[in-house]
Image: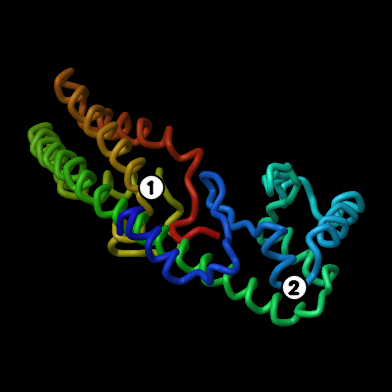
């Protein structure tokens, strides 16, 4: 979904009596106090007094509102934009002859817009994962090819169990990235885009260790330990496979 299409979907689904605003890179949804006053059936100056008191008393924190201004008939007036938390905290104190209807409409719009933003985030994450997986397949293929060369190299030095290095090196790479809880047969399919990017870096680091070790004609066991040491450098920041 493109940003333009997303913006169109938002406009189609928002009630234009409540012009919620998406602010900043973290997509905070905000309501203008003018819209709150209109929806609750109160004068805007009364809503401002309520918000001022809640800010003074510390009920609404500085992270939950943005002071703003607007121009009407050539004069400048102040207003606030409240994010979801700020609005929910202020809601019980605003009152007004249409407070019940206003609360329902605004809360519904917050939830509707939040759902759209979450859907968009999931689509972006899905796309990012697809791109990362395609890129990751290259690094995995490169590592697999290098392990194949290493297996042949180890056999030439007398190893009778060289085939086990396919699994051993792969497990070392995965264990450097995540704590495998729960266990999974297809770890790559459960990773986020960021994790996939980091996985590619670890895989290519293992490739470099194997390549350099064979070029230096080191003993295969020494090369294997070197590859494990290289990937374990990344283990300091590992996390559980499914979070938590």
Percent position of residue 54, x then y: 87, 56
- Residue under numbered circle 1: 195
Percent position of residue 178, x then y: 43, 50
Numbered circle sitting on residue 212: none
Between the C-alphas of marks 1 and 2, the distance is 46 Å
Image quadrant of residue 225?
Answer: top left
Quadrant placement of the C terminus: bottom right
| Residue shown at the point (21%, 30%) measured from the top left | 210
Percent position of residue 209, x then y: 25, 28
Mark 2 surroundings: few (<14), some (14-19) or many (≥20) residues within 10 A: many
* Residue most extreme to the front: 73
Mark closer to the chain start, 1 or 2: 2
Percent position of residue 212, x then y: 20, 22
Say left or right for 228 vs 53. Answer: left
Q: Nearer the viewer, residue 204 or 175?
A: 204
| Residue shown at the point (83%, 57%) measured from the top left | 45
Q: Is the residue 17 above or below the residue 104 in the image? A: above
Q: Is the residue 132 above or below the residue 7 in the image? A: above
Quadrant placement of the N terminus: bottom left
Say left or right for 226 vs 216. Answer: right
- Residue under numbered circle 2: 40
Q: Is the residue 117 above or below the residue 23 in the image? A: below
* Residue most extreme to the top: 216
Q: Nearer the viewer, residue 43 or 53?
A: 43
Q: Nearer the viewer, residue 35 or 141?
A: 35
| Residue shown at the point (33%, 59%) measured from the top left | 5
């Amino acid at each position: 979904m493109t940003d333009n299409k997303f913006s169109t979907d938002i406009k189609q689904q928002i009630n234009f009596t409540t012009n919620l605003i998406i602010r900043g890179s973290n997509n905070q949804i905000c309501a203008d106090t003018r819209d709150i006053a209109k929806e609750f059936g109160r004068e805007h100056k009364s809503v401002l007094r309520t918000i001022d008191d809640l800010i003074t008393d510390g009920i609404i924190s500085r992270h939950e509102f943005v002071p703003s201004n607007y121009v009407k008939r050539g004069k400048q007036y102040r207003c606030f934009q409240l994010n979801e938390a700020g609005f929910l905290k202020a809601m019980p104190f605003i009152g007004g002859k249409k407070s019940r209807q206003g609360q329902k409409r605004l809360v519904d719009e917050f939830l509707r817009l939040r759902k759209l933003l979450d859907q968009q985030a999931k689509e972006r994450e899905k796309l990012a994962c697809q791109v990362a997986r395609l890129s990751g397949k290259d690094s995995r293929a490169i590592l697999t090819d290098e392990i194949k060369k290493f297996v042949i190299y180890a056999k030439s030095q007398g190893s009778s169990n060289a085939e086990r290095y396919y699994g051993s090196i792969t497990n070392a790479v995965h264990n450097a990235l995540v704590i495998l809880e729960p266990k999974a047969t297809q770890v790559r399919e459960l990773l986020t885009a960021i994790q996939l990017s980091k996985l590619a870096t670890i895989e290519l680091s293992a490739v470099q260790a194997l390549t350099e070790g064979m070029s230096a004609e080191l003993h295969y066991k020494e090369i294997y330990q070197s590859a494990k040491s290289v990937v374990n450098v990344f283990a300091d920041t590992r996390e559980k496979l499914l979070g938590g």
